[in-house]
Image (cartoon, rainbow, N blue to C red):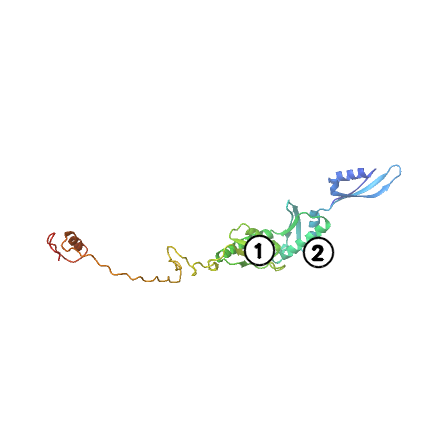
Amino acid sequence: MKEIEITASSYEDALAEALEALGLKEDEVEATIVKQSGLIRKKVTVKVTQKATAKDVAVNFISTLIQKMGLECTAEIREEDDAYYVSVSGKDTATLIGYRGDVLDCVQYLTLLVVNKTIDLDKRIIIDGENYREKRTAVLSRLAKKLAIKAAKTGKDVALEPMNPFERRVIHSALADDKFVTTESEGEEPNRYIVIKPNKRSFSDRPRRGGNGGRQSGKFGGKQSGGRYSSQKPASAPVQKSEPKEEAPKDMYNREYSINFKRTGGGKLRSFGEKKRTF
Protein backbone atom coordinates (compact mmCIF):
# COMPACT_ATOMS: atom_id res chain seq x y z
CA MET A 1 0.00 0.00 0.00
CA LYS A 2 1.21 3.50 -0.82
CA GLU A 3 1.74 6.08 1.89
CA ILE A 4 2.96 9.68 1.94
CA GLU A 5 3.17 12.71 4.28
CA ILE A 6 2.62 16.21 2.89
CA THR A 7 2.97 19.56 4.70
CA ALA A 8 1.01 22.53 3.39
CA SER A 9 -0.72 25.68 4.56
CA SER A 10 -4.06 23.87 4.85
CA TYR A 11 -5.48 20.38 5.03
CA GLU A 12 -7.10 20.69 1.62
CA ASP A 13 -3.88 21.75 -0.07
CA ALA A 14 -1.91 18.94 1.58
CA LEU A 15 -4.51 16.34 0.57
CA ALA A 16 -4.64 17.54 -3.04
CA GLU A 17 -0.86 17.45 -3.29
CA ALA A 18 -0.73 13.92 -1.81
CA LEU A 19 -3.39 12.59 -4.20
CA GLU A 20 -1.50 13.98 -7.15
CA ALA A 21 1.74 12.40 -5.93
CA LEU A 22 0.13 8.99 -5.36
CA GLY A 23 -2.03 9.07 -8.47
CA LEU A 24 -5.14 8.08 -6.51
CA LYS A 25 -8.62 9.40 -5.91
CA GLU A 26 -9.92 10.72 -2.60
CA ASP A 27 -12.17 7.70 -2.01
CA GLU A 28 -9.16 5.40 -2.43
CA VAL A 29 -7.12 6.85 0.44
CA GLU A 30 -7.30 7.58 4.14
CA ALA A 31 -5.97 10.95 5.31
CA THR A 32 -4.87 11.83 8.83
CA ILE A 33 -3.53 15.13 10.20
CA VAL A 34 -0.18 14.42 11.83
CA LYS A 35 0.58 17.90 13.27
CA GLN A 36 -0.23 21.58 12.97
CA SER A 37 2.15 24.48 13.64
CA GLY A 38 2.34 28.26 13.35
CA LEU A 39 0.01 31.06 14.42
CA ILE A 40 0.25 33.43 11.53
CA ARG A 41 1.48 31.04 8.87
CA LYS A 42 -0.13 27.73 9.63
CA LYS A 43 1.52 24.53 8.60
CA VAL A 44 -0.45 21.30 8.42
CA THR A 45 1.18 17.90 7.96
CA VAL A 46 -1.15 15.27 6.50
CA LYS A 47 -0.45 11.54 6.25
CA VAL A 48 -2.21 9.95 3.28
CA THR A 49 -2.42 6.15 3.05
CA GLN A 50 -3.93 4.11 0.30
CA LYS A 51 -6.93 2.09 1.42
CA ALA A 52 -6.55 -1.66 1.57
CA THR A 53 -8.35 -3.49 -1.23
CA ALA A 54 -9.50 -7.08 -1.31
CA LYS A 55 -6.80 -7.77 -3.84
CA ASP A 56 -4.05 -6.42 -1.58
CA VAL A 57 -5.33 -8.11 1.57
CA ALA A 58 -5.66 -11.48 -0.16
CA VAL A 59 -2.22 -11.56 -1.73
CA ASN A 60 -0.54 -10.24 1.45
CA PHE A 61 -2.20 -12.91 3.59
CA ILE A 62 -1.35 -15.74 1.21
CA SER A 63 2.26 -14.60 0.85
CA THR A 64 2.64 -14.37 4.63
CA LEU A 65 1.07 -17.80 5.10
CA ILE A 66 3.39 -19.38 2.53
CA GLN A 67 6.37 -17.83 4.29
CA LYS A 68 5.22 -19.11 7.69
CA MET A 69 4.80 -22.62 6.26
CA GLY A 70 8.37 -22.53 4.99
CA LEU A 71 7.41 -23.16 1.36
CA GLU A 72 9.20 -21.86 -1.70
CA CYS A 73 6.25 -20.42 -3.57
CA THR A 74 5.03 -17.10 -4.88
CA ALA A 75 1.46 -15.84 -5.22
CA GLU A 76 0.11 -13.59 -7.95
CA ILE A 77 -3.42 -12.23 -8.08
CA ARG A 78 -5.57 -10.87 -10.89
CA GLU A 79 -9.00 -9.31 -10.69
CA GLU A 80 -11.80 -10.22 -13.08
CA ASP A 81 -15.50 -9.46 -13.23
CA ASP A 82 -16.61 -12.57 -11.34
CA ALA A 83 -13.76 -13.23 -8.88
CA TYR A 84 -10.20 -12.67 -7.69
CA TYR A 85 -7.94 -15.39 -9.07
CA VAL A 86 -4.77 -16.19 -7.11
CA SER A 87 -2.12 -18.28 -8.87
CA VAL A 88 0.55 -20.00 -6.76
CA SER A 89 3.71 -21.33 -8.36
CA GLY A 90 7.06 -22.55 -7.15
CA LYS A 91 9.05 -25.55 -5.97
CA ASP A 92 6.69 -26.55 -3.12
CA THR A 93 3.38 -25.97 -4.90
CA ALA A 94 2.44 -29.66 -4.57
CA THR A 95 2.65 -29.37 -0.78
CA LEU A 96 0.34 -26.37 -0.83
CA ILE A 97 -2.15 -28.25 -3.02
CA GLY A 98 -2.30 -31.36 -0.83
CA TYR A 99 -4.30 -34.53 -1.44
CA ARG A 100 -6.95 -33.74 -4.05
CA GLY A 101 -6.58 -30.05 -3.26
CA ASP A 102 -7.59 -30.26 0.41
CA VAL A 103 -4.79 -27.92 1.61
CA LEU A 104 -5.51 -25.52 -1.23
CA ASP A 105 -9.18 -25.42 -0.25
CA CYS A 106 -8.26 -24.65 3.38
CA VAL A 107 -6.00 -21.78 2.32
CA GLN A 108 -8.75 -20.44 0.10
CA TYR A 109 -11.29 -20.57 2.95
CA LEU A 110 -8.95 -18.81 5.41
CA THR A 111 -8.17 -16.10 2.84
CA LEU A 112 -11.87 -15.50 2.34
CA LEU A 113 -12.40 -15.07 6.09
CA VAL A 114 -9.52 -12.61 6.45
CA VAL A 115 -10.59 -10.48 3.50
CA ASN A 116 -14.22 -10.38 4.64
CA LYS A 117 -13.11 -9.28 8.10
CA THR A 118 -11.10 -6.39 6.65
CA ILE A 119 -13.45 -5.09 3.95
CA ASP A 120 -16.79 -5.99 2.43
CA LEU A 121 -15.97 -8.54 -0.24
CA ASP A 122 -18.23 -8.51 -3.28
CA LYS A 123 -16.46 -11.23 -5.30
CA ARG A 124 -15.23 -14.75 -4.86
CA ILE A 125 -11.61 -15.66 -4.20
CA ILE A 126 -10.25 -18.66 -6.09
CA ILE A 127 -6.75 -19.96 -5.36
CA ASP A 128 -5.05 -22.29 -7.83
CA GLY A 129 -1.64 -23.91 -7.98
CA GLU A 130 0.07 -24.84 -11.25
CA ASN A 131 -3.34 -25.07 -13.01
CA TYR A 132 -4.40 -27.87 -10.65
CA ARG A 133 -8.07 -26.86 -10.64
CA GLU A 134 -8.22 -26.76 -14.43
CA LYS A 135 -6.73 -30.24 -14.69
CA ARG A 136 -8.98 -31.58 -11.93
CA THR A 137 -12.02 -30.08 -13.67
CA ALA A 138 -11.19 -31.94 -16.87
CA VAL A 139 -10.79 -35.26 -15.01
CA LEU A 140 -14.06 -34.86 -13.09
CA SER A 141 -15.97 -33.85 -16.23
CA ARG A 142 -14.90 -37.04 -18.01
CA LEU A 143 -15.79 -39.12 -14.96
CA ALA A 144 -19.21 -37.49 -14.70
CA LYS A 145 -20.08 -38.21 -18.33
CA LYS A 146 -18.89 -41.83 -18.03
CA LEU A 147 -21.01 -42.47 -14.94
CA ALA A 148 -23.98 -40.69 -16.52
CA ILE A 149 -23.90 -43.17 -19.42
CA LYS A 150 -23.81 -46.03 -16.91
CA ALA A 151 -26.79 -44.66 -15.01
CA ALA A 152 -28.80 -44.09 -18.20
CA LYS A 153 -28.09 -47.61 -19.52
CA THR A 154 -28.77 -49.49 -16.30
CA GLY A 155 -31.60 -47.26 -15.13
CA LYS A 156 -30.13 -47.24 -11.60
CA ASP A 157 -28.74 -44.48 -9.39
CA VAL A 158 -24.96 -44.07 -9.30
CA ALA A 159 -23.47 -42.61 -6.09
CA LEU A 160 -20.05 -40.97 -6.19
CA GLU A 161 -17.54 -40.78 -3.35
CA PRO A 162 -17.62 -37.78 -0.97
CA MET A 163 -16.28 -34.60 -2.57
CA ASN A 164 -15.57 -31.03 -1.56
CA PRO A 165 -17.81 -28.18 -2.77
CA PHE A 166 -15.53 -27.34 -5.71
CA GLU A 167 -15.57 -30.90 -7.07
CA ARG A 168 -19.33 -31.26 -6.56
CA ARG A 169 -19.87 -28.04 -8.45
CA VAL A 170 -17.85 -29.43 -11.36
CA ILE A 171 -19.99 -32.59 -11.50
CA HIS A 172 -23.23 -30.60 -11.41
CA SER A 173 -22.02 -28.29 -14.17
CA ALA A 174 -20.80 -31.14 -16.39
CA LEU A 175 -24.22 -32.86 -16.35
CA ALA A 176 -26.44 -29.78 -16.18
CA ASP A 177 -27.53 -30.10 -19.83
CA ASP A 178 -27.75 -33.91 -19.90
CA LYS A 179 -31.33 -34.88 -20.76
CA PHE A 180 -30.92 -38.49 -19.63
CA VAL A 181 -29.79 -37.95 -16.01
CA THR A 182 -30.06 -35.51 -13.11
CA THR A 183 -27.67 -34.89 -10.21
CA GLU A 184 -28.40 -34.35 -6.53
CA SER A 185 -26.15 -33.77 -3.51
CA GLU A 186 -26.83 -35.90 -0.46
CA GLY A 187 -25.30 -36.37 2.97
CA GLU A 188 -23.66 -33.92 5.36
CA GLU A 189 -20.25 -32.26 5.26
CA PRO A 190 -17.52 -33.42 5.08
CA ASN A 191 -19.09 -36.61 3.66
CA ARG A 192 -21.45 -34.94 1.23
CA TYR A 193 -21.62 -36.72 -2.12
CA ILE A 194 -23.43 -36.63 -5.47
CA VAL A 195 -25.96 -39.13 -6.79
CA ILE A 196 -26.51 -39.39 -10.55
CA LYS A 197 -30.12 -40.41 -11.20
CA PRO A 198 -31.49 -41.57 -14.57
CA ASN A 199 -34.57 -39.85 -15.91
CA LYS A 200 -35.98 -43.19 -17.11
CA ARG A 201 -35.93 -46.52 -15.34
CA SER A 202 -34.41 -49.61 -16.87
CA PHE A 203 -36.50 -52.17 -18.73
CA SER A 204 -36.38 -54.58 -15.77
CA ASP A 205 -37.76 -51.93 -13.44
CA ARG A 206 -40.67 -50.93 -15.67
CA PRO A 207 -44.17 -52.17 -14.83
CA ARG A 208 -45.09 -55.21 -16.84
CA ARG A 209 -47.84 -55.03 -19.42
CA GLY A 210 -50.36 -57.70 -20.15
CA GLY A 211 -49.59 -59.56 -16.91
CA ASN A 212 -46.58 -61.43 -18.29
CA GLY A 213 -44.08 -58.68 -19.13
CA GLY A 214 -44.51 -58.90 -22.91
CA ARG A 215 -46.58 -57.40 -25.63
CA GLN A 216 -50.25 -58.10 -25.82
CA SER A 217 -50.26 -58.13 -29.54
CA GLY A 218 -47.83 -57.51 -32.35
CA LYS A 219 -45.88 -59.02 -35.15
CA PHE A 220 -43.84 -61.40 -33.02
CA GLY A 221 -46.30 -62.22 -30.26
CA GLY A 222 -49.92 -63.24 -29.78
CA LYS A 223 -52.32 -61.94 -27.21
CA GLN A 224 -50.69 -63.74 -24.29
CA SER A 225 -47.17 -64.24 -25.59
CA GLY A 226 -44.06 -62.35 -24.49
CA GLY A 227 -43.16 -61.41 -28.06
CA ARG A 228 -40.37 -62.69 -30.25
CA TYR A 229 -37.73 -62.60 -27.52
CA SER A 230 -39.91 -63.77 -24.65
CA SER A 231 -38.79 -66.87 -22.75
CA GLN A 232 -42.40 -67.79 -22.01
CA LYS A 233 -44.25 -70.10 -24.37
CA PRO A 234 -47.41 -68.71 -25.91
CA ALA A 235 -50.61 -70.09 -24.51
CA SER A 236 -52.12 -72.65 -26.83
CA ALA A 237 -55.46 -71.72 -28.36
CA PRO A 238 -58.40 -74.12 -27.89
CA VAL A 239 -58.64 -76.67 -30.69
CA GLN A 240 -61.79 -76.37 -32.72
CA LYS A 241 -63.06 -79.58 -34.23
CA SER A 242 -63.81 -79.33 -37.88
CA GLU A 243 -66.43 -81.38 -39.62
CA PRO A 244 -65.25 -83.55 -42.52
CA LYS A 245 -65.96 -82.01 -45.88
CA GLU A 246 -67.47 -83.99 -48.69
CA GLU A 247 -65.81 -83.55 -51.99
CA ALA A 248 -67.84 -83.18 -55.09
CA PRO A 249 -67.65 -86.21 -57.38
CA LYS A 250 -65.20 -85.82 -60.22
CA ASP A 251 -66.23 -86.31 -63.75
CA MET A 252 -63.73 -88.92 -64.81
CA TYR A 253 -64.82 -88.55 -68.42
CA ASN A 254 -64.01 -84.83 -68.59
CA ARG A 255 -61.06 -84.16 -70.88
CA GLU A 256 -59.81 -81.06 -68.93
CA TYR A 257 -59.78 -82.89 -65.62
CA SER A 258 -57.89 -85.77 -67.25
CA ILE A 259 -55.15 -83.47 -68.54
CA ASN A 260 -54.74 -81.65 -65.17
CA PHE A 261 -54.56 -84.92 -63.28
CA LYS A 262 -51.86 -86.05 -65.62
CA ARG A 263 -49.77 -82.87 -65.10
CA THR A 264 -49.90 -82.93 -61.29
CA GLY A 265 -48.19 -86.26 -60.99
CA GLY A 266 -51.01 -88.71 -61.02
CA GLY A 267 -48.85 -91.40 -62.58
CA LYS A 268 -48.40 -92.52 -66.09
CA LEU A 269 -51.90 -92.37 -67.47
CA ARG A 270 -53.30 -92.37 -70.89
CA SER A 271 -56.35 -90.59 -72.18
CA PHE A 272 -58.40 -92.04 -75.04
CA GLY A 273 -60.40 -89.10 -76.22
CA GLU A 274 -62.78 -86.59 -74.69
CA LYS A 275 -65.43 -89.06 -73.70
CA LYS A 276 -63.15 -91.89 -72.80
CA ARG A 277 -62.37 -92.71 -69.17
CA THR A 278 -58.88 -91.90 -67.83
CA PHE A 279 -56.80 -94.78 -66.53
Graded by Cα atoms within 10 Å as few (under 14), some (14 to 19) or many (20 or more), the crowding at tag 1 reads few
Q: Quadrant of residue 277?
A: bottom left
Residue 37 on image: x %, y %: 87, 41
> Mark 1 sits on what residue?
184
Q: Nearer the viewer, mark 1 or mark 2?
A: 1
Q: Which mark is residue 68?
A: 2
Q: Amino acid at mark 1?
A: Glu
Q: Quadrant of residue 49?
A: top right
Graded by Cα atoms within 10 Å as few (under 14), some (14 to 19) or many (20 or more), the crowding at tag 2 reads few
Residue 236 on image: x %, y %: 35, 62
Q: Is residue 72 visible?
A: no
Q: Mark 1 or mark 2: which comes first in sequence?
A: 2
Cβ atoms under marks 1 and 2 closer than 8 Å: no
Residue 32 on image: x %, y %: 80, 44
Residue 40 higher or lower than 161, as above or below: above
Between the residue at mark 1 and the residue at mark 2, the CA separation in whole angstroms equals 40 Å
Q: Amino acid at mark 2?
A: Lys
Q: Residue at x 83, y 40 (%)?
A: 44
Q: Say whether residue 200 is left or right of residue 46.
A: left
Q: Quadrant of residue 168?
A: bottom right
Viewer-proximal residue, 120 or 278?
Answer: 278
Q: Residue at x 56, y 54 (%)?
A: 183
Disc 1, SS = strand
Q: Is residue 54 visible?
A: yes
